[in-house]
Amino acid sequence: MKALAEQAGRDLEDASALEILQWAAETFGKRFCVTSSMEDAVVAHLASRALPGVDVVFLDTGYHFPETIGTRDAVEAVMDVNVITLTPRQTVAEQDAEYGPRLHDRDPDLCCALRKVKPLEEGLKGYAAWATGLRRDESPTRANTPVVGWDEKRRKVKISPIATWSQEDVHAYVDEHGVLTNPLLTDGYASVGCAPCTRRVLQGEDARAGRWAGRSKTECGLHG
Ligand code: SF4
């Protein structure tokens, strides 16, 4: 499977996002899903064109903005996708009781491990491949993202169909297809994560500068 993923990454580097997802649908069928942070529904929309009724996996950390949950609900209501909401083993209150309040301030890596990484690992068990909305231009840590690659940690094919897109490409697709987006994107947020770890970005900052601002952390561990 690893060799297949790496070969596909080379073969599909210049393919369109839809062609990449059509390859995924033909290769993996229902053993393929999309993960979405509900920042926008661009990849879910593309995937639903390639595979109507595709599973869209959403991690409900318990710390999301209401706008993000609303976007999830709207996607579920209007799109031809099957939204699957994953939740951590513990509620926020249970986590606070075991680790103390505001773990996200004291040990965000542990908080992300408990509320994102572990639930995703469990949720992806039935799939051979998963698609993300990663883009190379979002931050230096994402500059080498392959359109199709091998996720060694989870031993699955990882597909990033819009890896080569710019922010302008995303806007153009949203406008052309009337795709749902999180309302926070028009309220100063360029990247939307959990509320305690996300702030608006300043002019000139990169899209992910508002995530874990002021801390050394730049990624939640889902893509490491
Ligand atoms: Fe916790 Fe923040 Fe990670 Fe969300 S982004 S899981 S609140 S540390």
Image: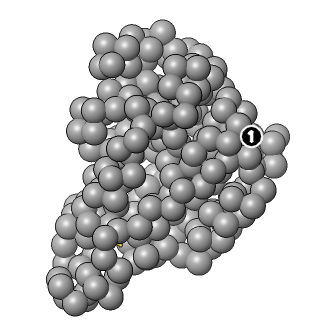
Q: Quadrant of residue 90?
A: bottom left
Q: Nearest the camera: 121 or 63? A: 121
What residue is rendered at 28% in x and 32% in y? 155
Residue 204 visible in the picture: no
Q: Which residue is mark 1?
A: 172
For the question of whether residue 64 can be seen, the reply is yes
How many marks the image carries: the answer is 1
Res. 94 image quadrant: bottom left
The colour scheme of the drawn protein is: one colour
Report the front residue among 102 and 85.
85
Vertical order, 125 against 57 (above or below): above
Q: Secondary structure at mark 1?
A: helix
Quadrant (top left, top right, bottom left, bottom right) of the C terminus: top left
Tell me the quadrant of the picture where the N terminus can be found. top left
Q: Residue at x 30, y 56 (%)?
A: 117
Image x and y of residue 11, in percent: 48, 9
Where ligand 1 lies, by quadrant? Answer: bottom left
x 44%, y 61%: residue? 86
